[in-house]
């Protein structure tokens, strides 16, 4: 079994259809209770976050909720690949 965090589904797009930069998303949440590092955002956006503090999991779910306008839970962002 392999478990990881993937927030790519909720990652916002720029007007031209490309993915919004990590810097731009980080700036939206900088100095808020949901602030995480750019590294955490990058790895989670790429679906490769394997280790995280539980507080960061909550923050990432809240960030996805705010970006998408829908409720996103920790269960939604945790992906499990069975062997």
Image: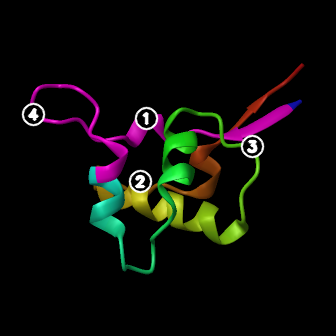
Which residue: 29% across, 32% down? 19
Where does label 2 land, which residue?
Answer: 64
Where does label 3 land, which residue?
Answer: 50
The N terminus appears in which quarter of the rendering? top right
Q: Quadrant of residue 16?
A: top left
**What is the CA distance from the residue labelled 2 to the residue labelled 3?**
18 Å
| Of the image marks 4 and 1, the number of the one nearer the N terminus | 1
Where does label 1 land, which residue?
Answer: 9
| Of the image marks 4 and 2, the number of the one nearer the N terminus | 4
Which residue: 58% across, 66% down? 58
| In-image side of 40 versus 14 (left or right) | right
Range shown magenta: 2-23
Q: How many labels does the image show?
A: 4
Position of residue 78 measured from the top left corner of the image (x, y, whole percent)? 66, 44
Which residue: 46% across, 35% down? 8
Q: Which residue lies furthest to the left in this view?
A: 15
| In-image side of 82 versus 11 (left or right) | right
**What is the CA distance from the residue labelled 4 to the residue labelled 2?**
19 Å
Position of residue 52 measured from the top left corner of the image (x, y, whole percent)? 72, 57
Residue 15 shows which numbered tag? 4
Mark 2 or mark 3, which is nearer to you?
A: 3
Position of residue 82 measured from the top left corner of the image (x, y, whole percent)? 85, 24
Residues at circles 1 and 2 in contact by the CB criterion of under 8 Å = yes
């Amino acid at each position: 079994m392999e478990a990881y965090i993937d927030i790519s589904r909720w990652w916002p797009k720029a007007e031209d259809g490309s993915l919004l930069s990590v810097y731009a998303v980080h700036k939206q949440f900088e100095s808020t209770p949901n602030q995480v590092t750019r590294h955490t955002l990058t790895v989670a956006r790429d679906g490769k976050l394997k280790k995280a503090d539980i507080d960061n999991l909550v923050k990432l779910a809240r960030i996805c909720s705010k970006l998408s306008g829908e409720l996103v839970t920790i269960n939604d962002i945790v992906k499990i690949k069975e062997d």
